[in-house]
Image (cartoon, rainbow, N blue to C red):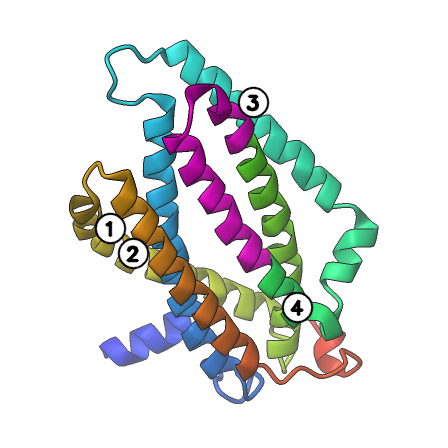
Amino acid sequence: MATAFLRGYLLPCDYPQSVSEDYLEYQVWDTLQGLMQYLKGVICTLSYLRGLGVGAADSSLHGAMVIWVIRDGTACFSGLAAGNPSLTRRFAERRQVKAWRLVAETTKGAAGLVVLAASTGPAHRFLPLVCVAACAGSVAGVIDSCTRSSLMTHFAREGNFSDCSAKEGNQDRAVKLVGIACACQFLGSLGSSPRAAWLAYALLTGLHLGFNVLALRALRLDDGAGPAATKRD
């Protein structure tokens, strides 16, 4: 019963006939990289909050909100720039999907490194650095969205694009629940040591990129001219 429930909740209807042959192998590696990405996000959030002065007696709520707003504004503007139709068409091109996905994940890793640097460096550099990180993360997010949409089109062999996308979302939420459980222990081991955060982030980034490479190697993409590129429910 539990197996049937999980299968229906996490895999597209009529699996495996309804998806491409490379679907399961790709999703296994993609799920593992998603877990690494979530744990990296925990470290970045912890570092960002530390940089804002959370927990410090002399921290200012108003100053923290100003930084938050400026960072979000930078992310929005950079996301709009990356969302230019001429760029998004290039990001979604089937023949270049693997390269762009690797670019997106590498950029996310670099953005996290900048956040860690911002939280451990001089206070006057914190805002410029987190804005740089927000810009890089936003651009990576646009690339990730475009390439993922192209991959869902590739996987959907029976016009079941929305079903594949929905199950992708369920998989992401399920792995985040696992990540939350891991993070409870993870945060305790990190403590307040910036050095521990750097080491943990470096290890997770290596695993994250490694799983991404394995996922990309599992893909057997066509040229996008077949029914998978045109049929959607």
**Residue 8's x, y, as percent?**
38, 75
Q: Earlier in the sequence, mark 1 or mark 3?
A: 3
Instruction: Kindly indicate the quadrant of the structure image that contains residue 32.
Output: bottom left
Single out the mark in the foreground, 4 or 2: 4
Magenta segment range? 104-130
Quick one: SS at disc 2? Answer: helix
Tell me if label 4 and label 2 are in contact, CB under 8 Å: no
Single out the mark in the foreground, 3 or 2: 3
Q: Which residue has dot 4 on it?
A: 99
Question: Residue 111: within the magenta?
Answer: yes
Residue beneath the point at 64% across and 71% down? 98
Q: Earlier in the sequence, mark 3 or mark 2?
A: 3
Q: Inspect the image, locate mark 3, and give the three-letter code of the amino acid beneath it.
A: Ile
Quick one: SS at disc 4? Answer: helix
Alpha carbon distance from label 1 to label 3:
28 Å
Residue 219 visible in this rendered orientation of the protein: yes
Quick one: SS at disc 1? Answer: helix
Residue beneath the point at 59% across and 50% down? 141
Q: Which residue has dot 3 on it?
A: 70
Question: Residue 158: within the magenta?
Answer: no
- Secondary structure mostly seen in the magenta stretch: helix
Q: Which one is in front, 8 or 88?
A: 88
Q: Which residue has dot 1 on it?
A: 183
The label number, if any, that marks residue 179 in the structure image: 2
The label number, if any, that marks residue 46 in the structure image: none
Q: Inspect the image, locate mark 4, and give the three-letter code of the amino acid beneath it.
A: Ala
